[in-house]
Image: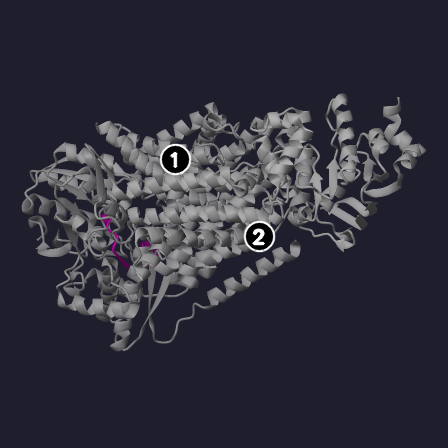
Amino acid sequence: MLEIRGLDVWYRHIHALDSVDLSVRAGEITALIGANGAGKTSLLNTISGLVAPRAGSIELEGSALSRAPHRIVRKGVVHVPEGRHVFAGLTVQENLLMGAYTRRKGFAGRLQEMYRLFPRLEERKKQQAGTLSGGEQQMLAICRGLISEPRVLLMDEPSLGLAPLLVREVFELIQRIRAMGITVLLVEQNAMQALAVADHAYVLENGSVVLSGTGGEVLADPNVRHAYLGAAAD
Amino acid sequence: MGYYLSVLTFTSITVVAITSIYVITGLAGLFSLGQAAFMAVGAYTSGILITRLSMPFLPAVVFGIAAGMLAAFLVGIPTLKLRRDYIALVTFGFGEAIIAILNNTANVTGGAMGLVGITPYTTTPVAVGIAVLAVVLARNFKYSRFGRQCIAVKNDEVAAASMGVNVAGIKMMAFLFGSALTALAGTLYASYTTYVEPGLFVWTLSAEWIIIVFFGGVNSLTGAVVAAVLLGTLPEILRATAEWRIAIYSVLVLLIINFRPSGIFGEYELPLWRSIARRFRRAG
Amino acid sequence: MYFLQQILNGLSLGAVYSLIAVGFALVFNILKFSNFSQGGLITVCAYIGFMITRTFGLGLGATLALTALAGGVIALLVERVAFRRLRRKNSPLIYYFVSSITMGILLENLITIYFSSNFYAFPRFFARSTVRFGPFFMATTDLAMLGISLSSLLILMIVLYRTTFGTAIRALSMDMNAARLMGINVNFAIAGTFFLVGVFAGLGGVFLGINYTLYPQLGKLIVKGFVASVVGGLGNILGAVVGAILLGLLEVILVGVPGIGSGLSPVVVFVILLVFLIVRPQGIAGIIVKEKV
Amino acid sequence: MKKLAIITIVLFAAAAMLVSASGQREDGAIRIGVIQDLSGPTSVWGNAVARGAELAVSEINAAGGIDGRQVELRTYDVRLSPQEAITAYNRLVDQDRVTAIVGPPISNIGLSLAPVAQAKGVPIVGSFIDPRVTVQPNGEPWTNMFLMQPSSVQYSEIIADFALTELGARNLAVMYDQTNAFSVSLVEPFRNYVNAHGGNVALEVTYTSDDRDFRTQLSQIQRSGADAVYLPIYIQEAVLTLQQAEQVGLDIPMIGGLDFAPPFTDLLPDPTLADGIYVANNYSDSEPQLVDVRAAYMDMFGEEPINKAFKGYDKILIIADAIRRAGSTEPAAVSRAIARTSNLRGTTGILTISPDNHQPVGLSMVMYQIINGEYSELGRHVPESHR
């Protein structure tokens, strides 16, 4: 579905991504794990057009993906950013309206779907998003991404800063998103859980892909166990 | 010859003013829209002392600088703790207030009709000498501990504070030092033109100085000084284009800001300066 | 009685300031800097409005509409020339400020070059120069200005709070990158905002021109709009209007205070400003709108 | 980084060289400098003076020049800045080697030029209204500064005398711009004259150049019971004042300064708003030589000349006359000749300059009353003490 070849990204003098190759298959959850600063977020930002690569190509179903964020969203590639980034001063409903900015037709119907998915959001639809709890904001951020009926959903650290109970809820949701037929590219620090739900996984280190395989294969890799799961296993 | 000397003198005075903006805006990241008012304070203090008390030049300059620093201290205490956007507004309001006071104390300042007959002490060598001195002082400040702290505060106040920098203190120090230089420029100006009036020190002059600093490169003292010389003389070079020259000047500045936002010099400093500074540090 | 009349005078002065302050607030809202090119823009619009009436002999309504349109187009150009590249390069905010001041100087000087060997004034649009309400009166142009600035403000509010595009502009002002990720075309939305700013400059320019005649430094008044918009709460539109009206009232009242008069009122305004910013750094807007500080 | 810096500096240096090389004098032409605000807040006047001077020079050249030599103008913009004025003066003197200079109608510029001109010797003929521009604190005239219109003292005395004798006003009010030197300079002599001649200045109110609402001041004037109000103010504020005076209901006679001269009534939304205003102007539209100059100006520039344009014209006449009388283009000789200008017929009156204070002698002002939006001439007014 999404083919990334030789992607090179620089921030002034910092080499953030070093010829990264990666493919995301349709209908699967692809997980991307790695330490802080490994380049995971840079990769998502590059796919969604926030960051311009110095070299490399990104193709969606065989045709090159535009570099302008609003065209990328129109193509159905939607990014749920790290740290939620809900529009704090807008109401919940307005946030969802912004999510549907590129596909306003049928918004009312899809809004009801989202509210069915998360009744709590409906209760708070007139409330400013900044006043929601962290978990609610995360749900809002995901719904805001889903409401445009994307084909590929890029999710950056959806479980960050959430209580364990909520973390489990998020991972259940991710599986449900896959069940809806939406392809997911998931960036997670919570490697154990991510790999458990992922069909495919990539490990990034210092801007390069060092390992890839099915979720199970990567989970079984001793280096990965040592580097990323050590703490979780203890 | 007299023509070149007068251009040189005015350019030197501009250089002194620009070093002050470099310290305040370039190093400490404070954005003063009322800096011209400190020039007015320096100019009027020295001008009044010279005309009314027949004070010699040097003490008049010292009093002028002291008055400028006192004003900066009074404005700085409540202001420097505010968010940066507000500092621009407060300094702007201060500038307007100073002009209002100058206009309303006509029996001392001459009001709108200006203060005339200031003895022309500022000769070209004096102005050039003081300009060089101001640049050397600013350079030493930049490479001193305080200069580095200023830059840290400019880049990230919270981080600087966590590293033990006294944020409010360092801002105040830069503001005081900068305003002393601005007032110095004012004393030179008054004793060169022999005539000052409140309308000379409006906020647009402060804005012009900021434009000059950015033109040269806000992170480069070399750039600020070179820009002061270039842009200070540009209207002179363009004199023959009459009413078009300020338009040409603006287009040039827009081009630089747009296509080279770090200014013509970026972060570059003359190597000579750096090595002198290093020697200073070793000696100090 | 005298005092009530003064308040009426202050309100009409505040209406002038608010047209300017709204323009400041709109740009600050999104790009987080005080756009000083607005003064030049207002001056250019005033002269354009004058040329339009002189050439086509149009009435006030048509002149306002055409000038607002022209103002919008010029504002788009200003955004393109002075700010778009800065945005693409992610330049620090202070560059926008420098760019905007320079742009303002450029616009003012272009007007100086073309128009500055004589004074010009708009023809008279209203048969009666004042409207009386019992013992009170108000200049017809002031009343029209108050009416048009309030109604255009209302329209602006409807656009911002009731349309998807307006919501997108607000979203953009809160989190530009998140707005990008929603598929909002940021360049387009910012251009749209500048168009609105230009429309306000067009309206303001014509009214300033009618009231104060035409001269190249007409835009100098924007400093009042600047003060009002900061006092109102940076980037808050309603706050800017309230700030502008308070400033107008304050100035009119101070003139009547013995010992202060017009001459020392900048000093009093400065002291009030300082106290206000220390006591209430979030601006007036904190009281009125809960939205962002 | 270094490359761009070096390129910029080299370009500047080249431009500077080019500019300083352009200062060569053409053979035979007499060069006259013009220092004006072509940009900045007083650009309207500066441009008008410059155009008036241009017209005068083109007429002189068409008539064969001065003593057979053509006249060439060098015009520099100083945008209301003493700093620019000083460098422009130095440049005109040192690079362009001008014989004399047409000065601006701005006293502040004159005040900063007086000491420089004293030192460098090239005379300036200006319309600086502040007497300090032409007279030093010790009472001696500044050698090279000349005024060609009534000084602020002469001017305000003419108006004060008119108010007292012709209007019969006793209680006078004054409203002026506290931040404007022109405005301020016209207040004190007015007050002194009125008080010394049996009148009384009942109220003085001020505003600043940033103000746009004068209704409070105008109400104060109305409540003061003054018979008439004197308004030595700039044209934009004059327009506002009249509109707002109507709103406040202030309808005592108003006596305006030069800024109430044409095209003032054209700027009003309704010219009849100015009815009842008394205006002092430097010249009369009925004088025959003015008609030709006005027609020529409109021909050349496609617009009506304003008051300052005629002054620009006359400044050239004074300089040309002095060069002819001196028989030389040496600045010092021309300066001495200007100081002895006498009975020169200009557009703004018969010009005679006093060698004692370098100000014009016996220059009357033409008084007008505006009736039905039209200027109606009341004749020239000269106080007893000026004759």
Residue B22 in the image: state x and y as whole percent: 55, 41
The answer to whether C58 appears left or right of B17 in the picture is left
- Taking the magenta stretch, the answer to whether it contains residue B171 is no
The amino acid on which the numbered mark 1 sits, given as a three-letter code, is Ala
Q: Which residues are magenta?
A: D116-131
Is there any visible trace of residue C13 in the rendered image? yes
Query: Alpha-carbon distance for marks 1 and 2?
Result: 32 Å
* Residue topped by disc 2: B258
Which structural element holds mark 1?
A: helix
Disc number placed over residue C244 in the picture, else none: 1
- Taking the magenta stretch, the answer to whether it contains residue D119 is yes
Q: Please, is residue B191 above or below residue D87 in the view?
A: above
The answer to whether C106 appears left or right of D156 in the picture is right
Q: Quadrant of residue A83?
A: top right
Residue D314 in the image: state x and y as whole percent: 22, 63
Residue A101 in the image: state x and y as whole percent: 61, 43
Q: Residue at x 34, y 34 (%)?
A: C248
Q: Nearer the viewer, residue A171 or C209?
A: A171
Q: Residue at x 47, y 51 (%)?
A: C75
Q: Nearer the viewer, residue A78 or B52?
A: A78
Quadrant of the image containing the C terminus of chain A: top right
Q: Please, is residue B271 above or below residue B91 in the view?
A: below
Q: Residue at x 90, y 36 (%)?
A: A218
The amino acid on which the numbered mark 2 sits, given as a three-letter code, is Asn
Disc number placed over residue D22 in the picture, else none: none
